[in-house]
Image (tube, grey):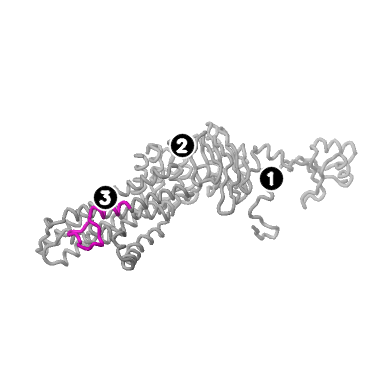
Amino acid sequence: MIKSDGLTKKFGNKTVVDSLSFEVASGVVTGFLGPNGSGKSTTMRLIMGLDLPNAGGSLLNGKRITEIASPMREVGVLLDAGYVHPTRTARNHLWALAASNSIPKSRVEEVLSMVGLTEVAGKRVGNFSLGMKQRLGIAATLLGDPSIVILDEPANGLDPEGVHWIRNFLSYLADQGRTVFVSSHLLSEMALMASALIIIGNGRLIAETSVEELTSNSGGSSVFVRSPKLAELTAALVGAGAKVSNGEAADRDGIVVTGLEATEVGHLAFEKKIEIHELSPRTSTLEEAFLELTAGFQEYQTEKHGEVKP
Amino acid sequence: MIAQIHSEWIKFRTVRSTVVLAIISVLICVGVAVIASADIDGALSVSNALVGVQISFLFIMVLGVQIIGQEYRFATIRPTFSASPRRERVVIAKLVVLIATVAVAAAALIALSLAAAAIVSSMRGNVFDLGQPGTARVLIGTVAILVINGIFGFGIGCIVRQPIAGIVIVLVWITVVENLIAGLVEGAARWLPFFSMANVNAQSISSNSDFMGPVVGALYGATIALALVALGALRIRSMDA
């Protein structure tokens, strides 16, 4: 279990992480989401004691990281796959880390096998692709068979097979009762691998929720209705308390209804004797829910014509 | 602590640059020993055979900087401190590995340089005189000088946490700053770390009052080098990795 309380980090005058408090439970994969520059990586470095907080702190299984006698046996972390010496071999990279926590060399071979790097273990890491470095980083997190695993963008650089593998692997780790805390900008991947979510923006907590709760609570739960008598139907729906908006450009003969269930819309149309051609409930995706929730928290946004503004 | 030292030893010997620097420091001294013994007529002293230490120690200092500096350069310091969050233990383990490695390199440097000098001297029909006064001081002092300089480089590396900046600082300090201060401020030379150690590995002790005696000089130099390491360790502890 990870518990952060009032975590605050400033770089100069800029507050990157702002009184952030949250808990990451064991037994589930917890996704860590936030727009670019929202402070996700800094938060992970703070949890690991690599960055020193201006206020607050984090506990890993109830202990500060500096109080843990053999940290790799308690927490495995992958912050950046590039944190390797290019002239050191993969095996030696892992061996040096393992030795610092008295983890036997045989475990190095086990984790190399788990991530599929046994054949290239004797090669210098500088020649590795990003995907191979990512696997090496994941191997390093597993060296101590830890009860907490923290991964920052683990799917970066992985091919589709690798992404599929990491998704299943994280679920497997969580099923074993471990605490799995993972950030990713691939929201579709997050929707598949995480069940709990912690969402931050501008270093502040926006939501501590689940994927299911987030998507169902977002304003994106709606009903699409197509009808030859749109004006009449719209008036009836508004009269019943629903909110009605036009659909996408491709759906000009339809409207999007929020505030009423599909069955209620159908029943109302039946009562008013309004012919309808389509009635389909729409649940927002995690991406839509995320964008809705973090609107206004983006440090970098694109305007419609593609210009980037801070 | 043993596990940490083991980890640092693996790191040391599995990176090309650190091993190459240690080997170069040995080979340069051996090469200079060959040149010196081929050039000097008459009896050759141990001091003559080990004159190359004046170049070798620069590589040992760079090695000291590199041991910590390259961890920051490649950001491997983050996995290192994630695995070993008590940072001062990492610094101490690196220091132990450095001292042990430099001591072994110094022993190899002495043995090979003396052997090379003996072979060249005998080929030229010269005497290689191991019995001259001060020989023991040259031998012990050479190990001490190399180890202290390695610690000095390591201390600078810990403070600046960047290999290039660290290397520039130690080289400029030795070649420019100390000479400048010694020339401009009367009586200051005695207190400068490298001037203070001038007699540590000397065959005959200089009468120049600017230089400390061999034992005091070695202790003074070691104290400054270790103080730099302590300062660097405090800085490493108090800053983001």
Asked whether the residues under marks 2 and 3 belong to the same chain, the reply is no
Which amino acid type is shown beneath numbered disc 2?
Answer: Glu
Please, is residue B230 above or below residue B179 in the view? above
The answer to whether residue A272 is magenta is no
Q: Is residue B83 left or right of residue B59?
A: right
> How far apart are the two marked residues, 2 and 1, measured between alpha carbons?
37 Å
Q: Mark 3 falls on what kind of element?
A: helix
- What residue is at 51 percent from the left and 46 percent from the top? A52
Q: Mark 2 points at which residue?
A: A67
Q: Which mark is residue B103?
A: 3
- Residue A243 seen anywhere in this rendered image of the structure: yes
Q: Mark 1 points at which residue?
A: A293
Picture quarter with the C terminus of chain A: bottom right
The earlier-in-sequence mark between 2 and 1 is 2
- Residue A193 seen anywhere in this rendered image of the structure: no
Residue A201 on image: x %, y %: 63, 47
Residue A23 found in image quarter: top right
Give the letter of the chain under mark 3: B
Question: A114 or B50, which lies in front?
Answer: B50
